[in-house]
């Protein structure tokens, strides 16, 4: 839907303070276009995989120790001048962490301990020099509350914190900044990276692996036309829609591929933008009969592959969602060019002056390489949680309304770190009804546990959404019912306070966030506070 400026003022969408105005992020510049670079000029890049600095093999479960420094860096993104980013290890996106997870003997699973060191220094906000504080959330991991990146468990520059992650099951997840009121800016500046957990059941499937298992981390950024610096503007807290599409930090890359199967793990790491993915043999329109097979959702494999054929079947990807899919490039003759297209979703296209965002990258089918990988018909057992409710038992049903007053709200309320809006029992199954009052999409994310979508406005979810998820698009005037068990995927009970919020990071920063508390005996999210670097002991 389209909202005119006058209507927006009437609805209270324009106005209200809190807009970041600074020399770093000049707000008047949002309407300017980024430099008009040619697309498909730079090759695709795999983000590097981070190696542990040390491993402890003894004990019940080996632990790998990683260290990541958050710092500013000047990186070459566009032709001409370099761009300052804030990155994990100074990279945009951060390095990939790949871990063996799972808790069965045959998984030989490992835990991770990551020391995140904040060396970001300061930035200008409204002319004032302020420290860049951070907190790290590993999105998709059932971590203890003190390691979940609570928005107010902040590390100042010059501080570090050791985060512990159990790696309970296989999935494509991600780590990103979660600082209160500043998440959108911090993630936009580069503080996001992918984290891949594997287990034995998945390895047995013989899906494409190694260089054929490919992360695609999508972001949209806007650059100043004179010096390529990043421009952050959330348009009076509505959302941030930029005009350069990056895959793994490279604008509109091309990727040489072989005529065989590839596994792609796509993550929408954009601030607000949603994507609609579809393959096409043409750059600016959709062709017919191009196929991809969705095999995984936010929290791991689907029960079976879901075939999506162009032009009608597309894969919608809202902020923070992850999907995994197989493309078999053997469907194309050598020397075919195939585009990953993004025919814009209406909620974005209202903001897009530039249709160049409607293509994401190009695959050049140039190589012939053998393919001994499989795409099995059955991937993983999936039991609907609704069938696990003993008959006659009442399941708690909670309703959360995502709306807008002076701020973005949940049930009419804004964020308050001392208020808890739901108290599930450890191990309990609950149904949550997520209601959108209209006007905007709200990609809702609930921390700690994995969910299943029951229905959207009473109708069944899209075919590829019928797996475990932790982000759900709740569209304009939509009601989505989701179901979860409040335990980890291996059945362990963890208690404590966790956040849930809209993952349009601009909405999150302007209060569309709250807390639930599992049980009452959990550790406080503030029980492992960051320490000054001067007191840092080697791990
Ligand atoms: Cu990906 Cu609470 O966030
Ligand atoms: Cu999360
Ligand atoms: Cu929202």
Image (spheres, helix red, strand yellow):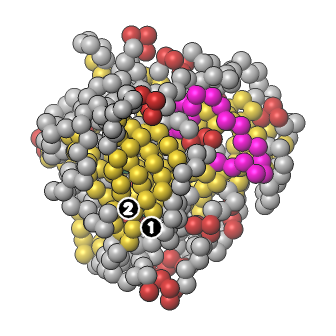
- The location of residue 223, given as percent across then percent down, is 53, 68
| Residue drawn at point x = 19 percent, y = 44 percent | 525
- The location of residue 47, given as percent across then percent down, is 52, 40
Residue 437 is marked as 1
Residue 469 is marked as none
Span highlighted in magenta in the image: 296-315
Q: Nearer the viewer, residue 187 or 70?
A: 187
Q: Residues within 10 Å of mark 2 (few under 14, many from 20)?
A: some
Q: Are marks 1 and 2 in contact (CB under 8 Å)?
A: yes
- The location of residue 536, given as percent across then percent down, is 16, 38
525 lies above or below 84: above
213 lies above or below 69: above
Q: Residues within 10 Å of mark 1 (few under 14, many from 20)?
A: some
Q: Please tell me whether mark 1 sits on a helix, a strand or a loop.
A: loop
Residue 401 is marked as 2
Q: Is residue 160 visible?
A: no
Q: Is residue 284 visible?
A: yes
Instruction: Work out which residue is located at the far front of the displayed protein and give it.
Output: 392
| Residue drawn at point x = 66 percent, y = 71 percent | 354
Pick whichever of labels 1 and 2 is earlier in the sequence.
Answer: 2
321 lies above or below 62: below
Q: Please identify the quadrant where the C terminus is shown.
A: top left
- The location of residue 182, given as percent across then percent down, is 32, 62
Q: Quadrant of residue 59?
A: top left
């Amino acid at each position: 839907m389209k909202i005119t400026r006058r209507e927006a003022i009437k609805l209270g969408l324009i106005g209200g303070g809190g807009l970041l105005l600074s020399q770093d992020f000049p707000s008047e510049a949002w309407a300017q276009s980024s430099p008009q670079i040619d697309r498909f000029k730079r090759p695709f890049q795999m983000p590097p995989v981070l190696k542990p600095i040390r491993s402890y093999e003894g004990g019940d479960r080996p632990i790998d120790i990683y260290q990541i420094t958050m710092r500013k860096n000047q990186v070459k993104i566009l032709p001409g001048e370099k761009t300052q980013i804030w990155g994990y290890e100074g990279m945009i996106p951060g390095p990939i962490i790949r871990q063996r997870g799972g808790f069965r003997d045959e998984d030989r699973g490992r835990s991770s301990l990551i020391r995140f060191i904040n060396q970001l220094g300061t930035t200008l906000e409204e002319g004032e020099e302020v420290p860049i504080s951070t907190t790290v959330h590993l999105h998709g991991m059932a971590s203890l509350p003190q390691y979940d990146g609570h928005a107010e468990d902040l590390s100042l520059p010059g501080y570090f914190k050791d985060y512990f992650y159990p790696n309970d099951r296989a999935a494509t997840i991600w780590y990103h900044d979660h600082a209160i009121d500043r998440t959108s800016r911090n993630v936009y500046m580069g503080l996001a990276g992918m984290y891949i957990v594997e287990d034995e059941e998945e390895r047995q499937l013989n899906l494409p692996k190694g260089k054929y298992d490919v992360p695609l981390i999508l972001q949209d950024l806007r650059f100043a036309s004179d010096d390529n610096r990043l421009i952050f503007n959330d348009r009076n807290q509505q959302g941030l829609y930029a005009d350069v599409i990056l895959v793994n930090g490279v604008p509109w890359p091309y990727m040489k591929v072989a005529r065989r199967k590839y596994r792609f793990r796509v993550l929408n790491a954009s601030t607000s933008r949603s994507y609609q993915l579809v393959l096409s043999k043409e750059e600016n329109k959709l062709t017919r009969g191009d196929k991809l097979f969705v095999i995984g959702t936010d929290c791991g494999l689907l029960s079976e592959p879901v075939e999506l054929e162009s032009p009608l079947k597309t894969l919608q990807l809202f902020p923070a969602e992850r999907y995994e899919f197989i493309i078999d490039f053997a469907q194309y003759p050598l020397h075919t060019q195939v585009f990953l297209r993004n025919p814009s979703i209406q909620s974005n296209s209202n903001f897009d002056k530039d249709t160049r965002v409607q293509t994401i990258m190009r695959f050049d089918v140039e190589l012939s390489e053998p393919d001994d990988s499989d795409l099995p018909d059955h991937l993983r057992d999936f039991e609907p949680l609704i069938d696990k409710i003993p008959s006659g038992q009442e399941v708690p049903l909670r309703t959360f309304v995502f709306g807008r007053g002076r701020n973005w709200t949940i049930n009419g309320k804004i964020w308050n770190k001392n208020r808890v809006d739901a108290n599930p029992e450890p191990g309990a199954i609950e149904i949550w009804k997520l209601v959108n009052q209209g006007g905007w999409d709200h990609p809702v994310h609930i921390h700690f546990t994995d969910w299943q979508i029951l229905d959207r406005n009473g109708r069944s979810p899209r075919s590829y959404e019928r797996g475990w998820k932790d982000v759900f698009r709740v569209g304009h005037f939509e009601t989505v019912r989701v179901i979860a068990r409040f335990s980890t995927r291996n059945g362990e009970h963890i208690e404590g306070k966790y956040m849930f919020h809209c993952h349009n990071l601009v909405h999150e920063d302007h209060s569309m966030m709250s807390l639930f508390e599992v049980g009452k005996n959990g550790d406080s999210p503030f029980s492992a506070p960051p320490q000054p670097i001067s007191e840092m002991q080697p791990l």
